[in-house]
Amino acid sequence: MIIAEVQTVRKFVLGVAILIGVLLFALSSANRASGTPAHEMIEWSGIVAIVVCILGRTWCSLYIGGRKIEHLVTVGPYSVTRNPLYCFSVLGAAGAGAQLGSVTSGLVFGLLAWIVFYVVVLQEERVMAEHYGAEFAAYKAAVPRFLPNLRRWRDVATLTIMPSKVVMTFVDAMFFLLAVPMAEGFERLQSAGVLPVLFRLP
């Protein structure tokens, strides 16, 4: 399998997940009324998670931007988890789901994102195994796939950064912020009776 095929699988799976996410946004509402302290706290917690996602993905791109297959990156965030970009994306998806004012929707969106990235990671790992053989096998055995092991942290004194890749990752991550106006827009359409509410989430 080549990297182009992995990217095709990733785009398809992400597209399906985004479509499901938008439908859930459009047809779901929180049990808590908008404007209540609990509702607002959940939404703001989600915004914090999205900001951490944006900053975290940008930080990761400093290490791996443009080098994902050409080099086996094992330092910085990649020394504690093999997929830090995806870990931050799962956090961002959970934050996006929380914009409904529901803890459940945040968890559901986070779980959906984890499933998507799990499928993608399995494909990517095959490519990395083909490219790096025993070196990747040793890295895979030592560093967890998702949950970070902070005790394994190690870094380098200098980094070669590709600014265009870092900017592209930052812009891509900003996509998560669209959840904020989208949730508000769907909420107004539901209040006006334009959209039905099929799911009430705690």
Image (cartoon, grey):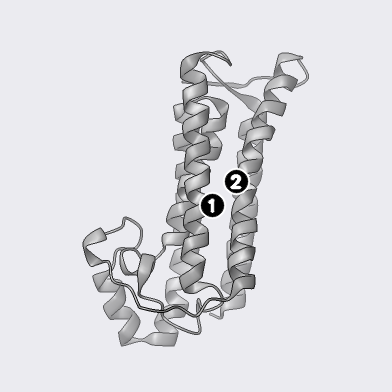
* Residue shown at the point (47%, 24%) measured from the top left: 41
Name the quadrant containing residue 66. Answer: bottom right
Amino acid tagged 1? Ile
How dense is the environment of label 2, judged by Cα within 10 Å: few (below 14), some, or many (20 and up)? many
Q: Which residue is mark 2?
A: 176
Is residue 115 at least partly visible in the picture? no
Q: Is residue 24 above or below residue 199?
A: below
Marks 2 and 1 sit apart, C-alpha to C-alpha, by 8 Å
Q: Nearer the viewer, residue 28 or 57?
A: 57
Percent position of residue 177, x then y: 62, 42
How dense is the environment of label 1, judged by Cα within 10 Å: few (below 14), some, or many (20 and up)? many
Of the two numbered discs 2 and 1 in the rendering, the one whose residue sits closer to the viewer: 1
Q: Is residue 104 above or below residue 136?
A: above
Position of 60 compared to 100: left or right?
left
Q: Is residue 38 above or below residue 154?
A: above
Name the quadrant containing residue 8. Answer: bottom right
Q: Sequence order check: which comes first, mark 2 or mark 1?
A: 1
Amino acid tagged 2? Phe
Is residue 137 at least partly visible in the picture? yes
Percent position of residue 199, x then y: 57, 22
* Residue shown at the point (47%, 56%) measured from the top left: 56
* Residue shown at the point (35%, 58%) measured from the top left: 146
Do the residues bearing badges 2 and 1 touch, measured as CB atoms within 8 Å? Answer: yes
Position of 181 compared to 74: left or right?
right
Percent position of residue 77, x then y: 37, 65
Position of 22 compared to 67: left or right?
right
Q: Which residue is mark 1?
A: 54
* Residue shown at the point (68%, 33%) measured from the top left: 181
Helix, strand or loop status at disc 1: helix
Helix, strand or loop status at disc 2: helix
